[in-house]
Amino acid sequence: MSSVSYGRTVYLSPNGNDSNPGTLAQPFFTLNKAWTIIAPGDTVYLRGGLYQYKSTQYLKDKNGSSSATIKVWAYPGEIPIITKNTTTSFSYTWTSGILFTGNYFHWKGIEITGFTQQDSKVYTGFRISDSNNNVFEQINSHHNGHGCVITGKSSGNLVLNSDFHHNQDPLTTLKYGNADGLELCYIPAGLTNTIRGCRFWWNTDDGIDLWQNDGVVIIENSWAWNNGFIPDTYTPAGNGNGFKLG
């Protein structure tokens, strides 16, 4: 997968406004707004700080190409943290904080947290569906339901040097029995995804779960520990597999 990029640069900030032009001096606030203008080769920089969104960032209908990936990166030296606004009712789409469908993107340096259960469904920080040839690098997804889910006809994706931890589901019927750090599920045969250099800990069910995955998952140089407990305790919770193969 090429990382060649020759397009424009779009900026987001926790203090931005979607009525702005998306420049460094006048940034956007939401990823949803950035998605209305991005094109192959563009870079979306998220400035550091807390993005308290009121609804799911539903990111679809945009793709890069093998020679012009779209970058969604933390601004150099800063940490953008995506979470939900706790002062209003959060409007979920498919129980996800970020819901992404796209090809030839490179996500890097994003922290995702606080997308916890509102009912018995297992809410997800970052859901990736029917997406191909993407890189998800230095993602830190924690204190959600599921940390991250990759599903559907998704192939050629690389999850690189990322952390998935402290994800839990206390409101499910079988309490704490479904929240995984990273789940690659319901992926058809013939599709391949790679997990490299990732860590999974203090998730109440499994570190990584390949539930109903008929494709190929290559896991390299990754670590899982202290899963299957209520986070930061040794009170038993879910299955506790570090790497669950289906």
Image: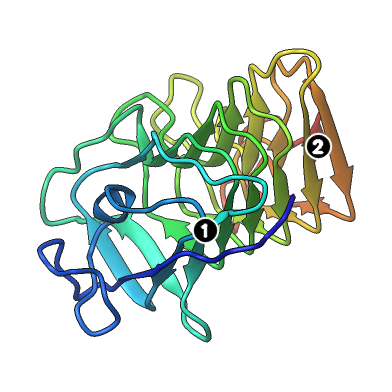
At 59% from the left and 26% from the top, the residue drawn is 151
Count of numbered marks: 2
Q: Earlier in the sequence, mark 1 or mark 2?
A: 1
Say left or right for 101 vs 121. Answer: right
Rendering coords of residue 230 (x, y %): 57, 46
Kindly identify which residue carries mark 1: 41
- Element carrying mark 1: loop
Establish if 210 lies above or below 140.
above
Q: Position of residue 167 (x, y in %)?
A: 53, 47
Q: Residue at x 10, y 63 (%)?
A: 19
Q: Amino acid at mark 1?
A: Gly
* Position of residue 116 measured from the top left corner of the image (x, y, whole percent): 37, 44
Is residue 152 shown left or right of residue 33?
right
- Asked if residue 25 can be seen in this view, the reply is yes
Residue 41, how many percent across, how many down? Answer: 52, 58
Of 187 and 23, nearer the camera is 23
**Residue 202 vertical placement versus 18 (above, below):** above
Say if 180 sits above or below 25 in the image: above
Residue at (89%, 55%) from the top-left corner? Answer: 221
- The residue that mark 2 highlights is 243
> Looking at the image, which is closer to me, 68 or 233?
68
Crowd tier of the residue under label 2, counting other residues whose Cα lies within 10 Å: few below 14, some 14–19, many 20 or above: some
Q: In the drawing, does residue 34 fall left or right of residue 1?
A: left
Q: Is residue 210 left or right of residue 33?
A: right
- What number is the disc on residue 138? none
Spatial CA span between label 1 and label 2: 35 Å
Q: Amino acid at mark 2?
A: Phe
For the point 49% across and 41% down, which residue is it?
A: 63
Residue 245 visible: no
